[in-house]
Structures are given as C-alpha cells and as structure tokens.
Image (spheres, rainbow, N blue to C red):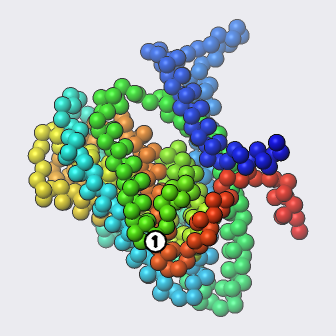
Amino acid sequence: MTPQQENKKMGLTARILIGMIAGISIGIFFQALFGSKGDFVIPLGFAELSIKDFFVDGLFNVGGAIFVASLKMIVVPLVFVSLVVGTCSLNDTSKLARLGGKSIALYLLTTAIAITLAIVAALIIAPGEGVNMATEANYAAKEAPGFAQVLINMFPTNPIASMANGNMLQVIVFALLFGIAMALAGKPGERLATIFVDINAVIMRLVVILMNLAPYGVFCLLAKLMTTMDFAIIANLGKYFLLVVAVLLFHGLVVYALLLKSFTGLNPITFYKKMRDAALFAFSTSSSGATLPVTMETATKKLGVNNSIASFTLPMGATLNMDGTAIMQGVATVFIAQIFAVDLTIGDYLMVVLTATLASIGTAAVPGVGLVMLAMVLQQVGLPVEGIALILGVDRLLDMTRTAVNVTGDCMVSCVVAASEKEFDYERFNNPDAGLSSEKVDFHKLGEENKV
C-alpha cells in the first residue's frame, strides 16, 4: 500500500477518534491505578517516576495546552483576514446588513428553541427530585454588563489591542469597516485586496497543518481530563447529566436537521457526515473560538459555503450562538428549583426563555459566559445563585458536548444564509471527497509549490 493510499484510508476523523479513545482509555487506567493515593510512583533505582507529575501534569498537560494554544493562535488572523477578503469582494455593501439580520435572527431562533426544549424536558423528567446533595456550597457570580454597554463595547478604540486580547466582536466590527473601506477605495483597495487574498490562502494552509496535529492534542486533552475527572459526582447527578446530554443530542441532530431541510432542502445526513471533524474538535477543546479555524475550513471546503458568507456568520456564531449553553440553563434552572423546592410559574419559565435568549447576545463579551448567563437567569426568577455550585462538577464534560452542538449550529446557520443569498456550492456539498481536512500535508510538495 502506497503512502497516498494509506493517508486516504486513514482520514483525519479516524485518527482523531483513535486519539480520543486512546486518551480516554489511558486516563481511566491511570485513575484506576492511582486509587485513593492520588498518584502512582515507579521506582527506577536512581530516582522515582511519578505518573501524575510526569504524565498528567507534565506530558498530557503540556501537549494539550500547546494544541489549544496553536488553534487559538490562528483564530484572530483567520477571522480578520477572511472577513476583510469577504467584505471587500461585496459589490453591494448593503448586503452586510442583510447578512447580519438573517444570521442574528437565526441564532436567536435556535437559542429560543433550545431552551424551550430543555425546560419542557426537565419538567417532564424532573431531574432534581430525590437528589440529596449539600447546598451550602457558594458560587460567586460575575456581573454581566447591560445590553447598551455591550453594544458600545463592540466598537474598538484600539483595534490592535482588541486583536491582542482576542475580543472577537471588536475584531469583527473593525474587519467589516476595513473591508468596506477597501471596497470603496478604488485601485488602492484592489491592490491591497490581492495581498489579503494571498495571506488568506497561507492561513488556510496553516490551518490544514495544525489539523494534522489534532489526534495528538486530543489524546493529551482527554487523557488528562479522564485522569482527573471525579466520576462519583456524575453518579450523583446522573439524571441531570443524562438529561442535558439527551436534549443536546436531540437539538443537534433533530432540530438542526429539520431547520436545514426546511430552509435549504439539503440532505442532513450529508451535512452531519461533513461536520464530523469540526464537531470532534469542538468536543475535545470545549471552545467554539479555538475550533473556529476548523469550522471555517469545514464550511468553505466541505459544505460549500462561500467565504464571504462563512467569514461573517461563523465568527458571529462562535461569539453569539449559545444553543448548547441555553439547554444547560433550561435544565439547570428546573433542576435547581426542584433541589431548593421552589415552585416556578409558567410566567417564570417564559421569563427564563426570554432572558436566556437575549442574554446570548447581551453577555457575548463576558468571560465564562455560560455560568454568567445561568446566574442572570436564576436571579431573574428568584432562585439562589449558589445552586450553580451543585452542577460545576459535571459541567466540564457537558461543556464539551454543548460546544460541539454550538459549532454544528454555526455551520447550519451559515448554510441557510449562504443558500438564501445564492452563495452556496451545491456540487461541493454533495461531493463526498470535497475538502482538505482529511488530507495529510505533503511538506515536500508544499515546499515545491512555494518556490519562486
């Protein structure tokens, strides 16, 4: 078998799955090995090898951190350059308002559906009934800014500082304004546009290179997580945990499929097959922002979304789309209300839906947005914010799942918006071999291509 045939047979998705399974297996093995001691020391004669220090806090921690950092490294230049390229290519600048309106409306719609499903499911299953857990734990909620302040904060006073701090909303606004200025600048704008197109091509190649490191990064992340995860907490919160996962899967696989089919007529099965790499990345990193390079590559190269659409809708979705978090909020609100024996009225639940939907935009620039939004929701209906401390133990695993759902929703909305704007490549979508994510990088060939 030639190397080319082997690469084709062992695609990126398969390699990531192998890394995930290996990481989970090693993590569970180490946790069983540690037992009640919390560590396992191997005597080597001249020294002692600590499994925890060398592997968990050393090898796994460093490998996972470098992998996530490498993904985050490319996010700001990718968003800025691709958005500038997409914006300056628009002949009709009024199209931006149309794209923004459609995108925000769809993101709010899916968020409202998500939290409504979560509340209904939680009321039926009642995950908080019969749970005997201590409630004296404290949780300090961060204060969320007002909606007017969020709008003000969207406009950067120093765009370079915004890029350095990773403030994506400010980066998006500056990129849009810069792209519009390039489109209106005539010949100077056209000359500058060719440079940005070349930079964008180089950045996308860098994305492919980083994606080939994913199996190793995923292995390190999951090995550390499984080694340090307290599975006793999951057992105590089993009903809550399984309900959140079930609603996440239903929303991600059923609701998105229905919306995609209704608005575009596209085959949802094909869509989900092409979303595998991005969903696995999102699950492993628990960050829509860190997954954004992979999401962009998936949407443009595999799904067929035009770059001018994807570069606008996907960064916005990574910042604003909170479907997975909304599901957690809906179930958690009912769960905490049942734990504290507080009866909520229909009006209270409607307030939860409204608050969580609007908060998906209102808290977009706040770190730890999921817990901030949940604190806002609990305060709105008079529930103790301290209840958040009860679910923190399982939130890490749930965060991985809801991030995968969020990323899937981002791409679904991008497909809908692109199809409505007639900026969607149906041939690429239906081509099972479309995209670069399953390719390994041939560095010799890459060097030959870049020779002048």
Image quarter (top left, top right, bottom left or bottom right) of the C terminus? bottom right
Give percent across and percent down for residue 184.
59, 89
Q: Is residue 111 above or below residue 99?
A: above
| Residue 47: percent from left, percent from top | 68, 13
Image-based side of 347 in relation to 237, left or right: left
- The three-letter code of the residue at mark 1 reads Thr
User: Can residue 137 be seen in the rendering of this structure?
Assistant: yes
Image quarter for residue 219? top right
Tell me which residue sits at (62%, 68%) in the image.
428
One can see residue 289 in this view: no
Residue 119, x across and y down, in percent: 23, 51
Residue 147 horizontal/vertical position (percent): 31, 68
**Residue drawn at 45 percent across, 45 percent down:** 400
Residue in front for this viewpoint, 34 or 445: 445
Q: Residue 231: which quarter of the image? A: top left
Figure quadrant of the N terminus: top right
Q: Along the horizontal axis of the image, is 276 left or right of 215? A: left
| Crowdedness near tag 1: few (<14), some (14–19) or many (≥20) residues, C-alpha within 10 Å | some
Which quarter of the picture shows residue 86? bottom right
Look at mark 1 in the image and give the residue it sits on.
264
Instruction: Write the residue at 41% across / 60% down.
Output: 256
Q: Residue at x 51, y 25 (%)?
A: 28
Does residue 131 sit above or below 76 in this rendering? above
Q: Residue furthest bottom?
A: 186
> In the rendered view, would you say 93 is above or below 86?
below
Q: In this orientation, which residue lies closer to the viewer: 77 or 213?
A: 213
Element at label 1 = helix
